[in-house]
Image (cartoon, grey):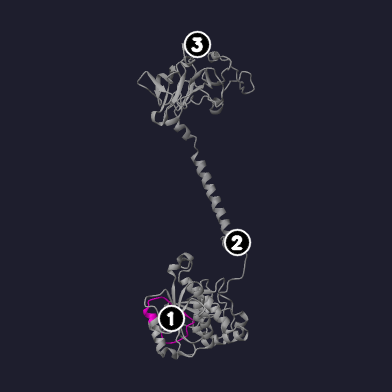
Amino acid sequence: MAADWVGSVVSIDCGATLGVYQGEVSSVDHSSQTISLKHPYHNGVKCPVPEVTFSAMDIKELKFLDIQNKVNKNSSGKDTATEPSFISTGRHGQTNKTNHSYATSNSSHSSSGPITNTRRGSIVQCQILFYVSNHQSLFFPLSSGSSNSRGTTQTTPRRSNVRNGGAGGQQRSKNDECFGDGTDENLDTDFDFEGNLALFDKAAVFSQIDGASSNSNKSQHHSAQAEQKTQSYRHDENILEGKPVTYRQITVPQHGGKEYCTDTGLVVPSVPYELHKQLLAAAERWGLSLERRLEAVGVCSSQMALTLLGGPNRLTPKNVHQRPTVVLLCGPHVQGAQGISCGRHLANHEVEVILFLPNFVKMQESVTSEVSLFSKTSGKQVSSIKDLPVSPVDLVINCLDCHENPLLREQSWYQSAADWANKNRAPVLSIDPPVSEQPQSVEAKWTLSLGLPLPLADKESRVYLCDIGLPKMIYQEVGISYHSPFGCKFVIPLHSV
């Protein structure tokens, strides 16, 4: 049975190492599982040896290109043997060498002749037969009834494609219908560049271009006029016409002599301390007591301090070994009580807080109340400068100064605390500093004002404004036309105008 396949043209794929071979089957040895090809081609190049033998273990894939050579008759009536036709599989970059057209199919048809399998060295049966006639590709299944059906296969004629409605229309194959006939007829004719260039009407084309440019200028002129009539907007702008923004929305009866502006351009005027004092007194009359203001100042100032300490980059549950250290320098007055309230909130947020407060002076009731609440936290309270850290800390909050009693600067405990803050080399945040013609004892990097800023002296300190929760009616009671500049925040930066 193996001898039935002698003379067939096959393509053998031996993998990436050995490559692809094509040739005519000269012998098939069933016992040794080998197949030999004569006149072989290796990767599209003719081999120097006349015959090559392959083992079934080396064969990855085998394809039949022609089942035994057919005998054709030429126009003179003589029998001529058809030359074997080779088609490469297209793998590994080999070239194609064909004499005829072939059709392929994935359909399976049975045959009685066993051959050497191309996969895993076992025996399979041939499934596909290719028949070549007049350079047209036709596909026919093998007959399962006889083993000799390879030589005399009965065919079913394909339907003829008749063009132009005539009976003598030309029969066309699928490839001809796809790519067309006669594509190579005019390849030998040179292209006439001069004759084609003579067909180009240069004057007409340039006149058309000039007309298009004039029309373009007219359209641009009309679009410019339309643009002047209707204003264009960006994607982040409001297309509805509204009132122009008034940047001076706060007016005061007594000007402090200095103005600030927010990041959005709103003007925030400063007020003298006397007007600021009247504003706080009006707030107490309306029920906004000192304790409420202390809580509001403590929350806002602690939020600002947490941001200065690094915020979420520093204060995380996984960073407990690097907790920031903050030192509070407070005096026995309202400003000191505001600092203690800030320290209580910082301690609640896992910040190491050290509170310095002298114990030999008389304290106000608000200070005593805040100290009592602070003692319930993990914060540490000291009364001597010697108990403060020698090494630099993360932040120093200064609340030593008082609006009512500027003579505190002359006391020894005040001067010792100010000297320690200046030598510690840590950044300083001052909360509600007083207005003074003298330079500040502690050089602050940030200054936090409450409600409305005071006319602070020009210095390198950055001024911030804190919202203490005063309603608009309280501002109007003291003659201030007020519109909140805070927006969505409780602490905003101010810039000198």
Pointer 1 local density, CA inside 10 Å: few below 14, some 14–19, many at least 20: few
Q: Which residue is mark 3?
A: 75
Q: Can the viewer see residue 260?
A: no
Q: Are marks 2 and 3 in contact (CB under 8 Å)?
A: no
Q: Residues within 10 Å of mark 2 (few under 14, many from 20)?
A: few
Q: Is residue 423 above or below residue 207?
A: below
Amino acid bearing label 1: Asp
Residue 382 in picture, x, y percent from top left? 44, 82
- Labels 3, 1: front one: 1
Q: Which type of secondary structure does the marked residue at label 2 adopt?
A: loop
Left or right, 143 with reference to 85: right
Residue denoted by label 1? 458
Q: Secondary structure at mark 1?
A: loop
Amino acid type for the residue under numbered disc 3:
Ser
Tell me which label, 2 or 3, sits earlier in the chain: 3
Residue 484 in percent (x, y) is at: 58, 76
Residue 422 covered by magenta stretch: yes
> Which labelled disc corresponds to residue 230?
2
Q: Examine the residues drawn in magenta and state their main secondary structure.
A: loop
Instruction: Spot the residue most to the top.
Output: 77
Q: Which residues are magenta?
A: 420-439
Q: Position of residue 287 (x, y in %)?
A: 62, 84
Seen from the viewer's position, the closer of residues 189 and 201 is 189
Residue visible at 39% across and 89% down in the picture: 412
Vertical comparison of 184 with 196: above or below: above
Residue 403 in view here? yes
Residue drawn where x is 46% and y is 72% of the image: 308
323, above or below 151, in the image: below
Across and down, in percent, residue 352 comes to 45, 74
Q: CA distance from mark 1 to mark 2?
A: 46 Å
- Is 475 included in the stretch rendered in magenta? no
Q: Earlier in the sequence, mark 3 or mark 1?
A: 3
